[in-house]
Image (spheres, rainbow, N blue to C red):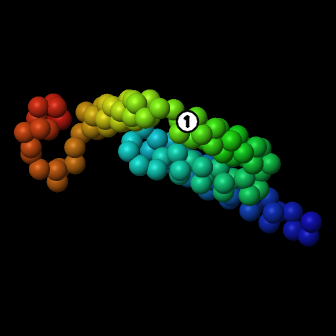
Amino acid sequence: MAKPHTALAYRVVVALLGAFVVLIGLALVPLPGPGWLIVIIGLFVISTEFHWARHVLQFVRTNVERWSRWIMAQPVWVRWTVGAVTLAFVAVVVWAVVRLIGLPHWVPELEVLRRLDLQ
């Protein structure tokens, strides 16, 4: 290796950038949106330089594929129930986050928000 310090610096930058993306994704997981996708993107970034991250990424890919095959093999009522439970969980998490940090000032006052004790 001609420039070991440059290679080390590059690996550190990749590790920090990937970890930052993973942390953002983990923070977004309970909220509606692409939290897990962002975590996987962060792992992909890290896996470009670190062997252990390639193993983690392969583990995630294998289990996501396994879950997808399992859920699609279930009757429709099971899929709808899993979807409804997931939606309820996300709704509770969003409600709790809004209760903890509050709504932004630009959100209009609405009766439904008052009834949910969010305003």
Residue visible at 52% across and 45% down in the picture: 36
Residue visible at 75% across and 48% down in the picture: 54
Instruction: State the residue in front, 6 or 33.
Output: 33
How far across and how far down the image is residue 83, in percent?
40, 35
Residue visible at 11% across and 31% down in the picture: 115
Q: Quadrant of the C terminus?
A: top left
Residue placed furthest toward the front? 75
Instruction: State the residue in front, 2 or 72.
Output: 72
Residue visible at 15% across and 30% down in the picture: 117
Q: Name above or below for residue 51 compared with residue 98.
A: below
Instruction: State the residue in front, 17 or 57.
Output: 57
How far across and how far down the image is residue 76, in percent?
43, 35
Q: Is 106 on the left or on the right of 50, as rendered?
A: left
Q: Which residue is mark 1?
A: 73
Q: Amino acid at mark 1?
A: Ala
Q: Name above or below for residue 8 compared with residue 92.
A: below
Q: Quadrant of the N terminus?
A: bottom right
- Is residue 38 among what the camera can see? yes
Instruction: State the residue in front, 8 or 53.
Output: 53
How far across and how far down the image is residue 43, in percent?
65, 50
Circle 1: element type = helix
Image quarter for residue 60? top right
Binning the other alpha carbons within 10 Å of mark 1 as few (below 14), some (14 to 19) or many (20 upward) gives few
- Is residue 100 among what the camera can see? no
